[in-house]
Image: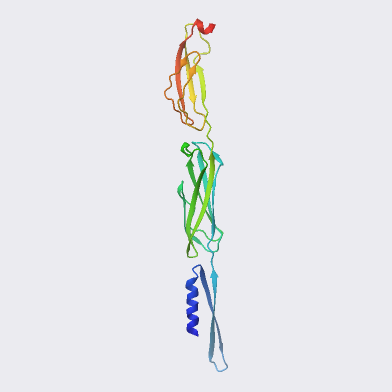
Amino acid sequence: MRYMFLLIALFAIIGIASSAELKNTVTASAVDGSGANVSSSADAAIVINETASGILLKDVEKKAYKPGEVANYTFRLSNTGTAKLTGIKVVDDLLGPIAMSTSEVGPGEFAEGTAQMKVTEDMLPGPVINYAVATMQGAGQPLTLNASAVFEIEAIPEILITKLTDVSSADIGKEVVYTFTIENTGSRTLYDVRAVDDKLGDLALPKTTLAPGENITVTKNHVVTVEDIEG
């Protein structure tokens, strides 16, 4: 009978990978009237069950970005179980490995991390969604958590031109220098950029493609004539 009990107990311990045994022994002792010592011991054991669980949260700072802007991400892994989580690694499919504040979190604790990504035109038309996977060990077993975040891309084409002169007034025959600045104030690359002045004609631009935020400057000289006044 004792042999069968030992076999059953051994099978139960091996089969519960997420459990631990708490065993304690009590001993009672006494001395009788003749001075003889007597004692007795008894054991008791309970199985402590551990649960390995957690939550991975991933957030992006804004709901929409323009090409050229930087998207800021935050990550938070919380231990919601009773077992310590160890060997924590977080990898994002677009951002790569994420540096977390710690690789081990106890019950009720958390680890945090941040990452950045520059938004580019090749992400158009959007939305941009990326996934993070956290792997770790808990209660003697592997645990995997997943999270995702998404944002839209604002694609707005805009152009701005400014025109300045080197003087505020001029006599006939006087040469005036005009300075033109053309800027891409939108969030998409502009192609075939041209500038035509109703008096000066086509402006010779140094380039005809402007990325978001890029600008070019060109100057053109003009001699004031009577026709300018009459026109």
Q: Position of residue 189 (x, y in %)?
A: 47, 31
**In this view of the protein, which residue sits in the foreground, 166 or 21?**
21
Q: Is residue 171 visible?
A: no
Q: In the picture shown, does residue 217 fall above or below 188? A: above
Q: Residue at 48% of width from left, 75% of height from top?
A: 11
**Farthest residue toward the front?**
125
Q: Is residue 46 visible?
A: yes
Q: Position of residue 198 (x, y in %)?
A: 51, 14
Q: Residue at 55% of width from left, 39% of height from top?
A: 64
**Farthest residue toward the right?**
33
**Farthest residue toward the left?**
206
Q: Position of residue 52 (x, y in %)?
A: 52, 62
Q: Quadrant of residue 191?
A: top left
Q: Position of residue 13 (x, y in %)?
A: 49, 73
**Farthest residue toward the bottom?**
34
**In this view of the protein, which residue sits in the foreground, 196 or 39?**
196
Q: Residue at 47% of width from left, 79% of height from top?
A: 7
